[in-house]
Amino acid sequence: MNPGHAHRPFEELVAEGAAVPTDGWDFSWFEGRATEARPSWGFATALADRLAGATAALDLQTGGGEVVDFALRQVAPKAPVLAVATEGWPPNIAKATALLRSRGVAVVASPEDAPLPFADGAFDLVSSRHPVSPNWPEIARVLRPGGTYFAQHVGPASVFELVEHFLGPLPDAVLSARHPDRERAAAEAAGLDIVDLRAERLRIEFHDIAAVVHFLRKVVWMVPDFTVEKYDDRLRALHRHIEAEGAFVAHSTRHLVDARRR
C-alpha cells in the first residue's frame, strides 16, 4: 500500500484512473493502490498441472492470454499438441495473439455469447478464468467424453459493496446469480459431472479513488453505465471515505469448478 496516493487531489486521481489502458487481465497497475486476497487453490498453477496432461486444450475468454501464458511456461515442453484460446474483445484479441503466438497457441476471435467455432469432441481440456457467463451446452459439446472443464468463476455478490455504493441496493435475484449450486445444476443438465466445486470469499481493499475508477472501467459489468462524469458525486463521496478510513473494503467471491463430460 502507498498511503500517499489517497491524499492527492480528487481530480488528479480520477484523471489518472481514467487514463490507464484497460486491455488484458494484467492487474499489476493496482500494486500499492488496491489489494485482493487470492483463492487458496492457486488457479494458474493448478491449470499448469492440467495442461501437462492434456493433448488438445481450449481456453475460453482468455483476456490478454496472461493466465494461459503463465501456465504453459510452467509445463514446457509438456504442453498440449493442440492449444487454442478464444476472446471476443478486439484489444484483448490483439494482446493475447501477441503474447501466446510464441507458445504455439492459436487465438480465435469469438464473441462470448456465440456458439463455439469448434467441432464436437475436439478437446480433452477446456479451461476458463472468470468467464462472463459459462455456456454449459457448448462446453460439453466441444469436450471429448471423459474430458475436463477446469475453471475459476466469479461467484455471487462479488464486490457488491462497491457496486451498491454506485447503484444502490441490489435485488436478491442479482445477488444470488452465479451461485455455485446454480452452476452445478446447469453443468449437470448439459451432460457434465462435477468432480470438485469449492467457493471462497476474499477481501479487497481500494486505497485510492484512481484504483476504483480503473477497476470499474476494466471490469465493465460491475457498473455497466459507469463514467466518471455520471458518477461524480458517488466518486467524491468514496474519495472522502478512503481519505478518512484509509481504504474502501469489499469482498470478491470465487469458485473453482472441476467437471467431467459423461
Image (cartoon, rainbow, N blue to C red):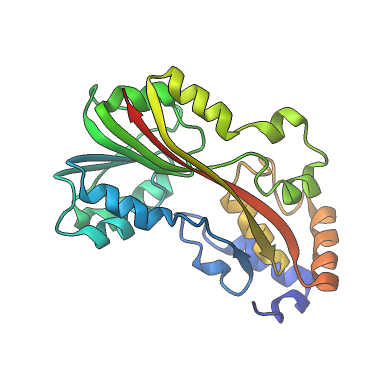
Estimate the x, y position of residue 33 in percent, counting from the top left: 63, 71
Residue 49 at least partly seen: yes
Residue at x-position 57% and y-position 27%:
182
Dividing the picture into quadrants, the one containing residue 224 is: top right
Estimate the x, y position of residue 99 in percent, counting from the top left: 30, 57
Which residue in the rendered view is the most extreme toward the front?
Answer: 195
Would you say 50 lies left or right of 28 here? left
Number of labelled discs?
A: 0
Q: Is residue 84 above or below residue 14?
A: above
Residue at x-position 78% and y-position 75%:
9
* Quadrant in which the N terminus appears: bottom right
Q: Is residue 157 above or below residue 48?
A: above
Nearer to the camera, 255 or 106: 255
Nearer to the camera, 151 or 98: 151
Residue 115 at least partly seen: no
Would you say 106 lies left or right of 38 here? left
Estimate the x, y position of residue 7 in percent, counting from the top left: 77, 78
Nearer to the camera, 55 or 98: 55
Estimate the x, y position of residue 71 in percent, counting from the top left: 31, 56
Q: Is residue 80 above or below residue 193?
A: below
Dividing the picture into quadrants, the one containing residue 145 is: top left
Residue at x-position 43% and y-position 25%:
136
* Quadrant in which the C terminus appears: top left
Dividing the picture into quadrants, the one containing residue 234 is: bottom right
